[in-house]
Amino acid sequence: MGRFLPLLLVLGALLALPFLLRPAGPATDWMPGDAELVVITPHNAAIRSEFGRAFSEWHEARYGRPVQVDWVVIGGTSEIGRFLPSEFAGAVRAWWRERGRDWPAGATEALFGKTRPESEELAALWEAYRATDDPQAFSSGIDLFFGGGEYDFRMASEQGLLVEPWPAGPPPGLFATPGGRTLIPERVSGETWCSSTFFGSVLTTFGISFNRDRLRERGLPVPSRWIDLTDPGYRGQLGLADPTKSGSSARAFDLMIQERMRAAVLAAGFTPERIGELEGGPPEARPALYEETLAAGWRDGVRMIQLLGANARYFTAASQRVPFEVGMGEVAAGICVDFYGRFQAQFTPGAGERVGFVAPVGGTAVTSDPIGLLRGAPHRELAVRFLEFTLGEDGQRLWCYRPGEPGGPQKYALRRLPIRRDFYPAEDPEFRAAYERHARHYADPLGDPAVNAYALSAAFTTWPRWTGAHFAAHRDLVRAMCMDSATELKTAWDAIVAAGPAVNPAALEALARLPDRPEPLNWQSAPTIYKNHRRLDLLREWTACFRANYREARALAEGTVD
């Protein structure tokens, strides 16, 4: 045993590292022995500070005790999506073995599968895991997952990591008014805003942060559409975030593809009403032309992202870096979430003249950043109270009020879009009165159609079938196509631009060619490709294909092909 002690100590330290690195919370009246809540989040320090303080004050006013919120910060939503299953797998394995049961081969994969395994041995484990919500049995040691994209929360729910906080139904007035008016809708324009296990707490749009000085220097107009950023004038002047690390970046790329697919089917003569009929009807009723047009639109979207990668100066792991560097003039433009873009536009010196932000109308959806209760939460009652605070009026004010306003944040203007309907203008007299009561405290004009989340959502409808099952493949495709082969891509693009894109169409065709191994990649194959191939094998093959294609494209552009 003695010779293994150093190894055990190292392993213990590694497991404890995320908890040791938790940032200290804000100063409150909390004392040892008072309540603690553990929350894992990708949210920034300003959000953590304001919500930790405000919830402690809210809880003390209602329940007589302050609360210490212990934030677990390990990175973006994608990192959290990998961390939580690993924590639960270890805890469930120990619990299962304590019950005298073997941990069979394939147990970890089966445990988090969406459907019940066929093997009776694995099925027994799968069912027992999903039937247990007791921290004395197993727990990740974390109560809540707070912030990130709907996709990551849907995956967590399907993996059984999230549980229903209100089995008997939510408290009155949280999701609907006493008169039955919906305060937090379940779905809007194809987007899921809440479900039985995760609940949108704030809304997000995606757009373009731009620096007018850098644009003028390069003779570029202010961008208003995603495709504007494919202009060769942006070479080396575009800031992007890594979609394998940033859930918001991955969602932005997904929406760009949706926008190209929608443009394709509209151009083919399918009206929005007809699209709705076809997507809502049986698969056999969809014309071959409609399916072929969607596939072509998907390819157009992928090619657009490829050219964004060709223009990119970098792909950062920290999505908030993009608008910051736009403000500093390090890049001319970048893709970011709305609140980062608006914040930078306001607080960059001379911002009104230099920095702007635009959400492409008809090119971006309004998505939710959810919150969910984790299975085996060690402080379940407290966690449910945090949910009620966050989704209620007290928590929603923090997102949009100016600092110092009654009920608003104390120090930081969070500049986010609250999800509750009564924070926006409406014809309904009750909602209109609530909006007018809130509006004089807002940091941003939520009544402006360019900011109003409910108005923006009406301009863009997402169709889950188009890209919903492609989300993971899109992340890895961007990595292989734009990041792991970045040198070859940029060199080929430079050669094509120098020669003139119209001079050699074959060079552009080679640049845009998609991998054909281990199987042809297209809209139809992408959703199921991971069932047939290992992820690392796909990344290796895709990267090799793209590098070869880019070398060929460069040679064609330079006229050096034999």
Image (cartoon, helix red, strand yellow):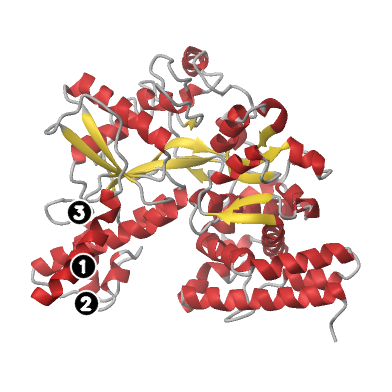
Instruction: Find disc 3 in the rendering and name its residue.
Output: 139
Quarter placement of the N terminus: bottom left
The secondary element bearing badge 3 is classed as loop
Name the outermost residue toward the right: 503
Quarter placement of the C terminus: bottom right
The answer to whether one can see residue 240 in this image is: yes
Residue 164, by quadrant, is: top left
Vertical order, 507 against 262 (above or below): below
Q: Does label 2 or label 1 sit earlier along the sequence?
A: 2
Q: Residue at x 41, y 34 (%)?
A: 47
Q: Nearer the viewer, residue 69 or 505?
A: 69
Q: CA distance from mark 3 to mark 1?
A: 16 Å
Q: Is residue 403 left or right of residue 251?
A: left
> Residue 377, position in %: x, y?
21, 46
For label 3, the crowd category at 10 Å Cα-Cα, with few meaning under 14, some 14 to 19 and many 20 or more, is many
Instruction: Find disc 2 in the rendering and name its residue.
Output: 104
Vertical order, 102 against 232 (above or below): below
Q: Nearer the viewer, mark 2 or mark 1?
A: 2
> Residue 200, position in %: x, y?
42, 39
Q: Does label 3 or label 1 sit earlier along the sequence?
A: 1
The secondary element bearing badge 1 is classed as helix
Q: Which mark is residue 65?
A: none
Instruction: Find disc 1 in the rendering and name its residue.
Output: 125
Vertical order, 287 against 212 (above or below): below
> Residue 322, position in %: x, y?
59, 45
Q: CA distance from mark 2 to mark 3?
A: 21 Å
Q: Nearer the viewer, residue 312 or 325?
A: 325
Q: How many marks?
A: 3
The secondary element bearing badge 2 is classed as loop
Q: Nearer the viewer, mark 3 or mark 1?
A: 3
Q: CA distance from mark 2 to mark 1?
A: 9 Å
